[in-house]
Image: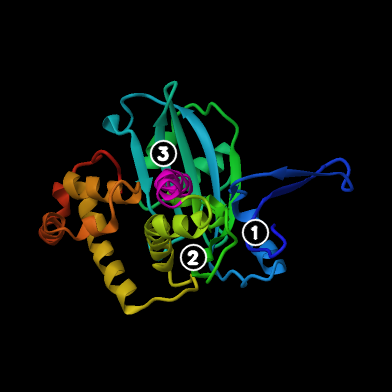
């Protein structure tokens, strides 16, 4: 830092082999993308800046992934299957058709639910989900990998955007700002959006206040992703968190939309675009979607196709 601690001038690197050995790397701009383990909040406090507020949402997610040989005829040619976790349940999963003729199948548990890593248990867990599609894939498919398991205790949003000031020439980005529930695959997308916003931020305003301006420019992406993931998690009454009237209205609408998305390709595609962050959540309230949701609710379920594309809801 400069002597008055108003601007970052570089980073100090400590040798992993000798804690006494340090190297100072001078820099015009320092970008912290060290993930949820970032020490920037602590460093800022030590330097006399405000404490960074943290929002947390405990989901206690565990997930297990296996690769399987894929038959192009599986599920009538469907290539993406998403089995969301119902509000009264803790199990879900996803299957993605990937390169070399394989399925990537991930089984998910939340609130401490742990999918098994052995093949028999994996298949049985898939059978227990709310729809049979993942079980249809794995019950007869050949596994081509070992099981890999991961855990994610809580989503966390560090509110650097609420600080009255940041040191000049410091940017915090990616999971160092907001660490998302991995069930929704949003972390890399938001980090990419932040990287894309960096160019215009630097072009228009230079280096000094880049950190605050990037947080402002990319806040819509962080907010959208946080709202989508936290809104889904809070649908489970066992998850602690605020449920304002606006959330209740949105959640009630989504509970109507999802069954329609299962069989209506227009609504399904709109929903996929939103969760993939190719469109803003307001797209789901567009009149062309709203009318199909309201009309679709009145259609008999028997008319639903067995395996809609591009995704199974």
- Residue drawn at the location 50% of the way across and 54% of the way down: 210
Asked if the magenta segment contains residue 74, the reply would be no
Does any portion of residue 253 appear in the rendered image?
yes
Where disc 2 sits, the SS reads: helix
Q: Quadrant of the N terminus?
A: bottom right
Residue 298: name its quadrant: bottom left
- Residue drawn at the location 53% of the way across and 55% of the way down: 208
Where disc 1 sits, the SS reads: helix
The nearer-to-camera label among 3 and 1 is: 1
Q: x, y percentage for residue 275? A: 34, 50
Drawn side of residue 288 relative to residue 109, left or right: left
Which numbered marker is on residue 161?
2
Q: x, y percentage for residue 3? A: 72, 62
Asked if the magenta segment contains residue 195, the reply would be yes
Magenta span: predominant SS is: helix
Residue nearer the viewer, 39 or 105: 39
Q: Are marks 3 and 1 in contact (CB under 8 Å)?
A: no
Q: x, y percentage for residue 48? A: 68, 71
307 vs 238: above or below: above
- Residue drawn at the location 58% of the way across and 46% of the way down: 116
- Residue at the spot of label 1: 40
Between the C-alphas of marks 3 and 1, the distance is: 36 Å
Q: Which residues are magenta?
A: 186-205
Rate crowding at label 1 as few (under 14), some (14 to 19) or many (20 or more) other CA atoms within 10 Å: some
- Residue at the spot of label 3: 95
Does any portion of residue 85 appear in the rendered image?
no
Query: Which of the two labelled residues, at mark 2 and mark 3, occupies the earlier sequence position?
Result: 3
């Amino acid at each position: 830092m400069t002597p008055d601690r108003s601007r970052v001038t570089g980073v100090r690197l400590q040798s992993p082999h000798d804690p006494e050995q340090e190297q100072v790397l001078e820099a015009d701009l320092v970008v912290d993308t060290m993930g949820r383990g970032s020490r920037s909040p602590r460093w800022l406090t030590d330097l006399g800046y405000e404490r960074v507020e943290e929002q947390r949402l405990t989901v206690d997610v565990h997930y297990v992934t296996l690769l399987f040989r894929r038959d192009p005829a599986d599920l009538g040619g469907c290539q993406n299957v998403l089995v969301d976790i119902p509000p009264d349940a803790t199990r879900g999963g996803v299957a993605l058709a990937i390169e070399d003729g394989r399925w990537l199948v991930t089984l998910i548990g939340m609130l401490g639910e742990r999918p098994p890593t052995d093949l028999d248990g994996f298949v049985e867990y898939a059978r227990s989900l709310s729809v049979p599609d993942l079980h249809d894939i794995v019950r007869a498919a050949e596994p081509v990998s070992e099981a890999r398991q991961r855990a994610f205790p809580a989503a966390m949003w560090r509110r650097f955007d609420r600080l009255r000031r940041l040191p000049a020439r410091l940017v915090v980005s990616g999971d160092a700002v907001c660490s998302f529930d991995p069930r929704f695959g949003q972390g890399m997308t938001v980090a990419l959006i932040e990287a894309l916003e960096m160019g215009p931020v630097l072009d228009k305003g230079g280096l000094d206040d880049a950190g605050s301006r990037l947080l402002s420019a990319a806040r819509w992406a962080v907010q959208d992703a946080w709202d989508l993931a936290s809104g889904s998690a809070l649908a489970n009454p066992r998850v602690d968190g605020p449920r304002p009237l606006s959330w209740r209205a949105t959640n009630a609408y989504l509970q109507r939309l999802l069954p329609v998305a299962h069989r209506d390709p227009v609504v399904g595609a709109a929903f996929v675009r939103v969760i993939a962050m190719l469109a803003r959540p307001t797209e789901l309230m567009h009149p062309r979607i709203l009318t199909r949701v309201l009309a679709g609710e009145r259609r008999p379920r028997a008319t639903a196709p067995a395996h809609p594309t591009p995704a199974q809801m």
